Image: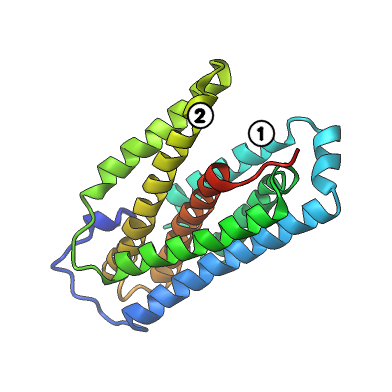
Amino acid sequence: MSFDPYEFDRSYTPASQNYSLGHYTAKTFLWVMLGLLVTGVVMVACWATRFTLYVMYTMPYIHLIALVATLILSVTMARRIEKMGVGTAITMFLLFSAIFGFTLSIYLFVYELMAVVLCFLLTGVYFGALAAYGYLTKRDLTGLGPILFSGLIFLIIFGVVSLFIPGLEVLDRVVCLVGIAVFLGYTAYDTQKIKSYYNYYAGYPDMLAKASIFSALQLYLDFINLFLYLLRFLGNRKN
């Protein structure tokens, strides 16, 4: 089987269903919440103890190493999740969330705490609204995939180019708006894909469990990226 949710056989009749789509979706979002909780705890702990500053002083490239580590984990989950055990998938997801918490802790030193809290709450509202839309809408959102992916590529290219070409900061607010739109779209898109995973892997409890964790990883990344772009757009930096 491919792990692409849009390659499932629509003529397939499941052998059995352990729980309803609503239960499965709720379980997926509980994984998202657990990942965000782990990230938040690690982020606040690293900030409160000033562990982040200590590590950055002793290991100047630690955030680059952490970024590479999260990329390796996410790619490994995407490519190998069918073959790995459920326990391994859970461990990788929680490890990914913890490393991301350390990476994000630097923002607590850059932005005012109140701005971080307000942007987090605003992200929760927007994320919840688009997730609800993605789950409830009868419209097929598959066509949004190429558009959203193109927007993501634009954001990545702009981020890399801005490292080498000074003066592009003037476009930052426009880019933030693009980023917000892209990850709001991805939130609805990835929420709707939960149904596809559920239908495709119905009758295979282990695969359903791993698909739930994989969906949670995608939605977790949607939430985090939406939060970061909102923070860049609305947040007040410390003097």
Q: Which residue in the protein does label 1 denote?
A: 64
Up-down: is 89 above or below 70?
Answer: below
- Name above or below for residue 202 compared with residue 107: below
Relative height, residue 107 to residue 28 (above, below):
above
Q: Position of residue 150 (x, y in %)?
A: 32, 36
Q: Is residue 96 visible?
A: yes
The residue sitting at 41% across, 49% down in the picture is 183
Nearest the viewer among 116 and 39 is 116
In the image, residue 123 lies at what x, y percent? 51, 58
Q: How many marks?
A: 2
Residue 93 visible, this orientation: no
- Judged from the image, the secondary structure of the residue bearing numbered disc 1 is helix
Tell me the mark number nearer the camera, choosing from 1 and 2: 2
Q: In the picture, residue 34 is in which quadrant?
A: bottom right
Counting from the top left corner in percent of width and height, residue 215 is at: 42, 61
In the rendered view, does 226 fall on the left or right side of 149?
right
Q: Residues within 10 Å of mark 2 (few under 14, many from 20)?
A: some
| 144 relative to 73 in the view: left or right | left
What residue would you read off at disc 2? 159
Position in image of residue 108 (x %, y %): 72, 49
In this picture, residue 47 sits left or right of residue 95:
right
Q: Residue at x 51, y 45 (%)?
A: 229
